[in-house]
Image (tube, coloured by chain):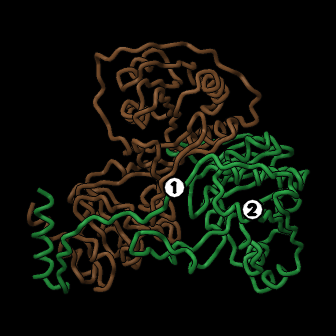
Amino acid sequence: MNVITCYKIVPDDQDIIVRDDRTLELGKAELEIGQYDLPAIEAGMQVVADAGGKVSALSVGPKLLENSKLKKAVLSRGPADLYLVVDDSLADADTHQTARTLAAAIQKIGNIDLVLCGEGSSDLYSQQVGAQLGELLGMANINAVSKITVEGDKLIVERTLEDEVEVLEVSLPAVISVTTDIVQPRIPSMKEVLSAGKKPVTQWSLADIGLADNPQTIETIDTLAPELAERKQIVIEGDSEDAVNELWENLRQELQ
Amino acid sequence: MSAMKNVWVFSEKQDLLVELCAGARQLGEKVAVLLIGNPSAADEAIKAGADHVYLMGELEDSRMVEDFLPTIEKLVAEHKPDLVMFGNTKRGKLMAGILAAKRGTSVLADVIEFLEDGTCKRRVYGGAAISTIKSNAEVAIATVGGGVFGTQALDESRQGTTENVDFVAAESKVKCVEKRAKAGATVNLSAAKRVVAVGRGFADKEDLKMAEELAELIGAEIGCTRPLSEGLDWLPRERYIGVSGVMFKPDLYITLGISGQIQHMVGCNQSQTIIAVNKDKAAPIFKQADYGIVGDLYKVLPMLIEKIKAGK
């Protein structure tokens, strides 16, 4: 079983600073693997642990992907090798551009049985790339998968929807977007971190994967922190009976 | 988006479909619904706001909702509406994505507002910001959640047309072999009028019982911050307030042991009144609360519960 797990490098949203004009300062934010992508990587490792095969990691994006710490971060979580498609134009890629780039890379890698995606990117969280990628590759295509079992040349998966769980038979090759509770991602051991630096990394440009023309179809006009509502800010200090009484009086007004 | 002529709606969830129909009426001159169901369901869709219903057939055991996509694709390709809105369930998101990929475009995902100039808004960075986006596609495709347009009463006198369309069969690479109800009741926090939200100020899962008691006394739903549902697994993900595409406008929002990071606050920012209990005087929550108490929730909460009981 040849497995690809896709991931995105994102800014840690705890580090995002909102400027006075409500624009965002992302430059100081620590970069990390998307938190929804980590379970997808681990799910890939589980699949090959059960069924044999190899997991490769794949990411497409701007030059920051080349950061060696970030490359080690993904490879220390198990994948045997890493493929990157790097072009600064991908920094503002919409979900269609991202899916097309991933699809072209996966076709170039070739001979892939299973592609795993997280349930969404932790920065923009459109939850769209997996769905579009499956269609572009013409593979079986399903999302919200919380369990994967390999059965011969098929997968039996559980799909957790809003109010029901489906058990699905999925033919291979397939693109599957997994939920965060499919598996707890590992914390890499020192040994895994050390060996990560020795694993092969293949880097391509858009031209290498034959994707010179990949226009944007959704334009982002601006991104601003929301205006906060005016609040009364009546704050009582202390947890004495009197203080709680005062709080209760305020609460009682609201309950009427 | 007042310039739109034709707005189409699909959702496999009846309540969401009704909301999206009402919304589509605000956005476009003509509203059509892509419907899985029977003729009486089509009548309901018309009462909810549809001018035209494409009745695609019923959901038989051998078919998944997703199997209706080729039928939808064919209709969209034939009629080219200005906008197709999918309810933002897991199924809706998958179907919107597949349709978009077929048509060589992206999806306006989890739109929270459509503006008159043709742009729309969505939350990004875990809710810390809102992007204004615009589709350049011939047929714009969007996913939209509950609460965005609000509900409107059904109009019993509304007239519309229903058209039976042929099911377009396609090779199915995914087959449903079993379905079961999901453990645990589903919660619809977006509809709650009062919410008691819990955060890391609670030291133990058992202690959430205090919050549950408070919630029950005042008729509120329980919500939580991300660490409680995703790190600690104390509460199901449906109760976590933050990244999800759900609009959240309760009348009363009580936070217990929540520091008030922006990623959480954006989820509840539109609450009518916010009350905060936190022991850290410097917690940002107090800047965004109407009423706050700087105190230990383990002391405040039992006293408050007693007072509510006594006051009843």
| Residue A67 drawn above or below residue B35 | below
Q: Dividing the image into 4 quarters, which one contains the N terminus of chain A? A: bottom right
**Earlier residue among tags 2 and 1:** 2
| Residue A234 drawn above or below residue B106 | below
10 Å crowding of disc 1: few (<14), some (14-19), many (20+):
few
Which one is closest to the eye, mark 2 or mark 1? 1
Residue bearing the label numbered 2: A60
B183 with respect to A134 (left or right): left
- Looking at the image, which residue is at 77% across and 54% down? A102
| Residue A13 drawn above or below residue B75 | below
- For residue B62, say whether it is visible: no
Q: Position of residue B113 (x, y in %)?
A: 41, 47
Please tell me the numbered disc located at residue A221: 1
- Looking at the image, which residue is at 28% across and 59% down? B271
- Of residue B225 and residue A156, the one placed in the foreground of this image is B225
Chain B pictured colour:
brown
Q: Which chain is green?
A: A
Q: Quadrant of residue A153?
A: top right
- For residue B126, say whether it is visible: yes
Mark 2: amino acid: Val
Q: Chain of mark 2?
A: A
Q: Position of residue B280 (x, y in %)?
A: 31, 85
Q: Dividing the image into 4 quarters, which one contains the C terminus of chain A? A: bottom left
- Looking at the image, which residue is at 56% across and 81% down? A28
10 Å crowding of disc 2: few (<14), some (14-19), many (20+):
many
Same chain letter for marks 2 and 1? yes
- Of residue A79 and residue B165, the one placed in the foreground of this image is B165
